[in-house]
Image: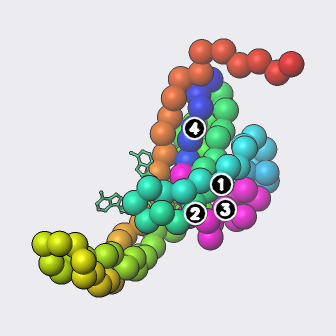
Amino acid sequence: MKLIVAIVHDDDKHVLESEFRKNKIPSTRLSSTGSFLRSGNTTFLIGIEESRVDEVLEVIKKNCEARDEVITAPINLDVNLEMSTAYPVNVHVGGATVFILPIEEMFRF
Ligand code: 2BA
């Protein structure tokens, strides 16, 4: 068995969750926060047989869209750090960030 950890955009979570349900892919949804944008995203945990990993990756790929986000980055203007302003920066956020880990054992009590 494998554990798929998929970090996706909040706007894709409902569609992805319903696709998981439709395809009988078990999943747990967690609210998470990206450390760079410091905004909410969604992490799915999927414990799945090795033979179904590609199927799960296809579902994720099909339903998670890459987006451009604008963040306002602070910039300091003097050496005393007393004056600062902000400027917009474009950040490309991928459709999904996915990790696949081996599961040693799984129990349901
Ligand atoms: P965030 O950390 O909020 O990052 C959002 C997007 O900002 C990233 O999109 C990337 O395009 C950009 N970014 C991140 N760190 C950067 C940096 N140091 N300099 C410039 N740009 C940077 P994605 O790569 O698609 O990542 C989306 C979300 O997936 C991330 O949100 C984070 O929550 C998660 N993630 C990505 N890589 C990860 C990793 N290696 N480990 C754990 N979580 C990861």
* Of callouts 3 and 4, the N-terminal one: 4
Q: What residue would you read off at disc 1?
A: 31
Q: Amino acid at mark 3?
A: Lys
Question: Which is more foreground, mark 4 or mark 1?
Answer: 1
Q: Amino acid at mark 1?
A: Ser
Q: Is residue 88 visible?
A: yes
Q: What residue would you read off at disc 4?
A: 4
Q: Are marks 2 and 1 in contact (CB under 8 Å)?
A: yes
Alpha carbon of mark 4 to alpha carbon of mark 1: how far? 16 Å
Q: What residue would you read off at disc 3?
A: 13
Residues in magenta, as a range: 7-19
Q: What residue would you read off at disc 2?
A: 40
Tell me which residue sits at (33%, 75%) in the image: 73
Alpha carbon of mark 4 to alpha carbon of mark 2: how far? 20 Å
Judged from the image, the secondary structure of the residue bearing numbered disc 1 is strand
Residue 95 point in image, percent of width and height: 48, 62
